[in-house]
Amino acid sequence: MTQKINKNKVQDKSPRKHKDIKKSIRKGLIMVHTGNGKGKSTAAFGTALRAMGRGKKVAIVQFIKGKWQTGESKFFKKFPDLCQMHAIGDGFTWDTQNFDADVKTAKKAWAKCKEVLQDDEHFLVIFDEINYVMKFNFLDPDEIIEALKNKPPLKHVILTGGGAPKKLINIADLVTEMQSIKHPYQQGIKAQPGIEY
């Protein structure tokens, strides 16, 4: 008797073998979310939620969009025991129209970054949009990289924003580049509360 072959059977394409790390080390990671696609800050905030869910303390310093009333700042401020939210920005550069003022504000935000980077309180710190301020020459990437190299060994750091400098990418433990395939702004749809901010 011949066996019938089911032509409609779905082929299993899932991985069934996994090479595990035999010996693992603990280390505070330097993570960079960059690229021209949407989702860099969103991914960082998801990691913040994960840490907070474990009872870990998080500090977030927001550059550039500090003047905005963002959904994330409203949310994180509801958990003052687990999250410190510092929105220290003056808005987009096409709104500010003042390089010297932008540099001054970026330096103020960077001072807060250095404070939370070195403290013993926070498990994870997020420097949201800091890659842009390096790209725009508001802050010196070498100073930021030096501070990251001298952070406490188990402190985790996420730096977001497009245009991350190559020097930062070289010292990072994890780099994710968000690529824009399609964006609502290209269809005439402006940023919407609860989705973009």
Image (cartoon, rainbow, N blue to C red):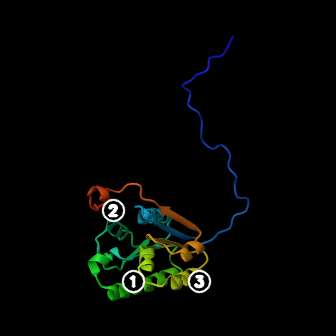
| Circle nearer the N terminus (3, 1) | 1
Task: Please give the label number shown on residue 106.
Answer: 1
Query: Badge 3 is on which residue?
Result: 150
Q: Is disc 1 placed on a helix, strand or loop? A: helix
| CB-based contact (under 8 Å), mark 3 and mark 1 | no
Q: Which amino acid does label 2 sit on?
A: Glu
| CB-based contact (under 8 Å), mark 2 and mark 1 | no
Task: Please give the label number shown on residue 131.
Answer: none
**Mark 2 crowd level (few <14, some 14–19, many ≥20, 10 Å Cα):** some
Is 69 displayed left or right of 158 in the figure?
Answer: left
The structure residue drawn at horizontal position 39% and vertical position 83%, both measured from the top left corner, is 106
Q: Which amino acid does label 3 sit on?
A: Asn
Quarter of the view holding residue 62 = bottom left
| Circle nearer the N terminus (2, 3) | 3
Vertical position of residue 176 compared to residue 150: above or below: above
> Measured from the top left, where is residue 112 in percent x and y?
43, 83
Q: Is disc 2 placed on a helix, strand or loop? A: loop
| Circle nearer the N terminus (2, 1) | 1
The structure residue drawn at horizontal position 33% and vertical position 59%, both measured from the top left corner, is 195
Query: Badge 2 is on which residue?
Result: 196
